[in-house]
Amino acid sequence: MDEQAARLLEDLVAIPSPSAREGEASRFLVERMKALGLEARVDEAGNAVGSRGGGEKEILLLGHIDTVPGEVPIRREGNLLYGRGTVDAKGPLCAFVLAAARASLGPGWKVTVTGAVEEEAATSRGARHVLSSRSAPPDFLVVGEPSGWERVALGYKGRLLLDLTLRAPLSHSAGLDPLPAEMGVRAWEEARDWCVRWTGAKGVFSAFASLDPSLRSFQTTREGTHGVVKLEMGFRLPPGLKPGELKDQLTGLLKPMEGAEIHLAFRGAEEACRLPRKGPLAGAFLASIRVEGGKPRFVVKTGTCDLNVLHAAWPETPALVYGPGDSSLDHTPDEHIDLEEYARAIRVLQSALERLTGEKK
């Protein structure tokens, strides 16, 4: 058991940091990075930033320090650590910090670790601040999300969120006219069915290539003689489908509804990205996983993360996603990480950094 690593993660997880309330966690992580020998600070966006090495060539390790809301009681059961953020994504972030602190860097290189804010809020405020505050992209980019210690993620689907507000006259439930709530259900069904038809027309058979709708929330209220329905819909976009194209389709599909006033507000638009398998970055991780006794695999994910934001701005920068943890536990009441897997991921990351900077062949 790597007790130093386990303690860092447990202490960080013990500090609640839902999106837009990451300040205490960022300050704590900065102090721990300083104690580990990194130069560290909280930047203007609230990101926790630490670095080692003084070279002009740079490897950026960007994770996120925020979590979704909801408490998961912190406890250890054998090698398992339970708590909100253990997997998504304080586990990968702490692995970045310790690998950066422990790695022997080649001359001319530096490593920067960033714990970004508001990744879970779909604003990606921390990642966007990184983009706006830099004069040039890094030489290599690794984004911290749970891939499993033996796997490297090379693709994430895009995203579009829609807040739909529908207002319509109330009528008697025994009558023939549809109630506002029923109109809201119909709007969701029309959006969902259009996505199913789009996927079917493309003839795709993989989750990464499909257009996936989700109904995130549904709320009804009464305003005098009218009913108001609010729906939040989410759409995961495959490569090749731009958020603007989907927005136009949904606007044409959902705006016309007889007897109802409808307002559509779109947000969180990100394009899908898929990265190449070959190159020194992927090669360093594959070799490091094998040395650790693993069987490396490439995967693509059906979610969206800060990789989408950064890759759109830095399309020529070699990038991938890596981190310990089982992503099926993201956001769940049972979120936990295997501390042995977490320790293996730290060793893989340390080895990969040393290979990329020339300290290890």
Image (tube, rainbow, N blue to C red):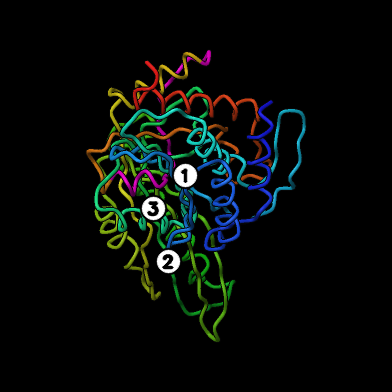
Label 3 vs label 1: CA separation?
9 Å
Which residue in the protein does label 3 denote?
A: 127
Q: Secondary structure at mark 3?
A: helix
Label 1 vs label 2: CA separation?
31 Å
Image quadrant where one finds the C terminus: top left
Which residue in the protein does label 2 denote?
A: 164
Q: Which residues are magenta?
A: 292-311
Image location (x, y in percent) of residue 87: 58, 39
At x 25%, y 53%, the residue is: 135
At x 54%, y 62%, the residue is: 218
Q: Quadrant of residue 308?
A: top left
Q: Secondary structure at mark 2?
A: strand
Q: Quadrant of residue 282?
A: top left
**Is residue 120 placed above or below 88 in the rendered structure?**
below
At x 32%, y 38%, the residue is: 55
At x 56%, y 70%, the residue is: 220
Within-10-Å neighbours for mark 3: few <14, some 14–19, many 20+: many
